Amino acid sequence: MYPYNEDAAFERLRDAQREMENSRMIADRTVDVLGLFAQPIIALVEAAIAAFRRDPAANRTPDADELEPARRIAS
């Protein structure tokens, strides 16, 4: 017969369960930490996309020819 120690087997089972629980807790913390870093990065990317999507004509300086009619009206 093979020697079988029930107490030792039970201890190995409990150790394996503890290790699985610790791994799960570490994985949850890792996701939380990554979420903390991801939120500001996502906000920066969204701001950059919004800046590139703005109408380029809104920031353009008018040419002298475009200002001429306004100068005639004002004088």
Image: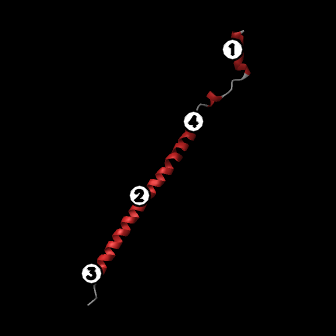
Mark nearer the viewer, 1 or 2: 2
Could you say whether the residue bearing mark 1 is in a helix, strand or loop? Answer: helix
Q: Closer to the observer: label 3 or label 1?
A: 3
Count neighbours of disc 3 (C-alpha within 10 A) and say few if under 14, some if 14 to 19, many if 20 or more.
Answer: few
Image coordinates of residue 66 in percent, x first then y, are 70, 19
62 or 11, which is in the foreground? 11
Residues under labels 1 and 2: Cα distance?
A: 64 Å
Residue 25 left/right relative to 73: left
Q: What residue is drawn where x is 48% and y is 54%?
A: 34
Disc 4 marks a residue whose amino acid type is: Arg
Residue 60: percent from left, percent from top: 66, 28
* Residue lying furthest bottom: 1
Q: Quadrant of the N terminus?
A: bottom left
Residue annotated with mark 2: 28
* Mark 3 residue element: helix
Q: What residue does disc 1 label?
A: 70
Q: Which image quarter: residue 19?
A: bottom left
Name the amino acid type tagged 2.
Asp
Q: Amino acid at mark 1?
A: Ala
Disc 4 secondary structure class: helix
Label 3 – label 1 distance at C-alpha: 97 Å
| Residue occupied by mark 4 | 53
Q: Nearer the viewer, residue 11 or 68?
A: 11
